[in-house]
Image (cartoon, grey):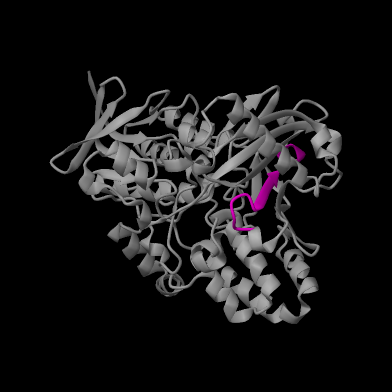
Amino acid sequence: MTERVDVIVIGAGIGGLTTAALLQERGFSTIVFEKNRFPGGSCSAFTNGGYTFDAGASVFYGFNHDDSKGTLNLHTRIFRKLGIELRTIPDPVQIHYHMPNSFEVPVHYDRFRFLECLYQRFPHEKAGIRRFYDELEAVYDILSSLPAGSLEDPMHIAAVGAQHPLKSMSLGVKTLFSMGGTARKYIHDEELLRFIDLESYSWAVQDALGTPLVNAGICLADRHHGGINYPVGGSGVIPAALVKGIEKFGGEVRLGTAVDEVIIDNGRAVGVRLKGGQEVHASAVVSNATVWDTFSRLVTDSRFQVPEGRFVKAPSWFQVYLGVDGRVIPQGFNVHHILVEEWDRYDELGGTIYFSAPTILDPTLAPSGKHTLHLFVTDETWQWERFEPKSQEYRKAKEDYARSLIARTERLLPGLSGAVELMVTATPQTHERYLGRLDGSYGPMLHPGQNVLFKPQNRTPVKNLFMTGDSTFPGQGVIAVTYSGVSCASYIARQLGRPLEYL
């Protein structure tokens, strides 16, 4: 049997769902195929023992309801366009950093309070701190005034250039610089530069020298404007709301349906072949898989294969999900934390602990008197290959490593080991299995020094085959893949003759 729609999306990650939702609302027929029984990819949630856990993402930009605050507020604008309500709770501190030598920085929504923390620690660098973070503000000011659209669409580029010529030229110049290079123009204290590297590493898994200034301007300035908001009900409500929007306008999301292959005829994508042999044809096919998985698994023609070394392959994660006695969380404790015990190890596997307690904002995620905690560190599949999956040795190794991370986290929460009532663990193999990503990787990143515009856009070498998600511009993170989805939908809509209105 063969079906036909306007657009097929492979993978119900946030980038793919955003693409489908905007196209479906515009009147194009779409189908999203997802091999798992749940949408969202790493921005999903699961329940266990009465607790609701964020599977991955838990820091969310783009939900401010005041359009004058924040870089485009893409999530708010998308859900407004779809007519879907999604409630969120403002988080007053983006991340609380805990570093060696009693160096602590809570990154407040209030920019002045955040900068004051740095001024107090580094009074001799006050002018440099101000100038560096003002550079990020300048990037933010440009980006917040430019509408989201495809950088591959000549009509979009011409329209933006005509309306904002000076800002467009200025942004083009800023793509030539890195966050770390800019910081080192103004700042010289090594401890402060390490903190700035950690600020980059916290979301990009790269130091500041390898992170484009434009990306930093989004993440490190928008937190003081649009702010960080947590969705009521956990991260899984975001993909659920996008699915609801797709279905509201007549589209379809088929969960538990794996795509085996993109069908290519005379160099153009014409549809997909599902596991089981059924074919579905379309005018455009969008892959939400990584660039490596798209061009090794879904597209079998070796001429299109992307070598692993073309990009930096980000590590994967080891994750620990805990249900704990609520008394272990002190009054006034912040939601998100990053713990570095030794500067020499912060960028090694397992060297930095990421930690969140979302029930501080949304207590409905846990039984009364309890909290959910999420600990994770960088990891790689090769560290677990010696174990037989599901074997007793594998389970014991996971538990032992999880217990060691819990013990390290007791620097923040004394008595945590004794407060644990439920523990679930996930290795890089878990990420690879559920997310269908090469080695469970966080995704492809640019090599240090590469211009951010070298990041793949939405078009691919195969005609009518497009990509969205963290393999494409601007990169990793929920708000970044949302932008990628907006860009992809904008380009496809233009090609199919019904351009999207700007959000």
Residue at the image position 73 percent from the left and 46 percent from the top:
335
Task: Report which quarter residue 119 is drawn in.
Answer: bottom right
Q: From the viewer's perspective, is residue 193 above or below residue 229?
A: below
Image quadrant assignment for residue 328: top right
Is residue 480 visible in the rendered image? The answer is yes
Q: Position of residue 415 (x, y in %)?
A: 85, 39
**Res. 175 image quadrant:** bottom left
Q: Residue at x 48, y 24 (%)?
A: 37
Query: What is the tally of numbered marks visible in this picture?
Result: 0
Q: Is residue 492 above or below residue 141?
A: above
User: Closer to the camera, 325 or 93?
Assistant: 325
Q: Nearer the viewer, residue 423 or 222?
A: 423
Q: In the rendering, at what x and y percent does residue 174 appear?
A: 46, 72
Task: Work out whether 357 lies above or below 114.
Answer: above
Measuring from the top left, give residue 286's x and y in whole percent.
33, 40
State left or right for residue 3 relative to residue 134. Answer: left
User: Which portion, as a residue range, is magenta?
Assistant: 346-360
Horizontal side of 339 relative to 383 (left or right) equals right
Task: Identify which residue is drawn at 64% across, 43% down.
Answer: 376
User: Does the stretch in magenta take in 437?
Assistant: no
Tell me, yes or no, if residue 224 can be seen here.
Answer: no
Horizontal side, residue 351 vs residue 152: left or right? right
Image point 59% across, 32% down: which residue? 45
Q: Is residue 358 located in the magenta-colored stretch of the structure? A: yes
Q: Depth check: give the residue in front, 284 or 118.
A: 118
Task: Work out whether residue 319 or residue 163 is closer to the camera in this orientation and state it.
Answer: 319
Q: Quadrant of the N terminus?
A: top left
Q: Outermost residue toward the left? A: 266
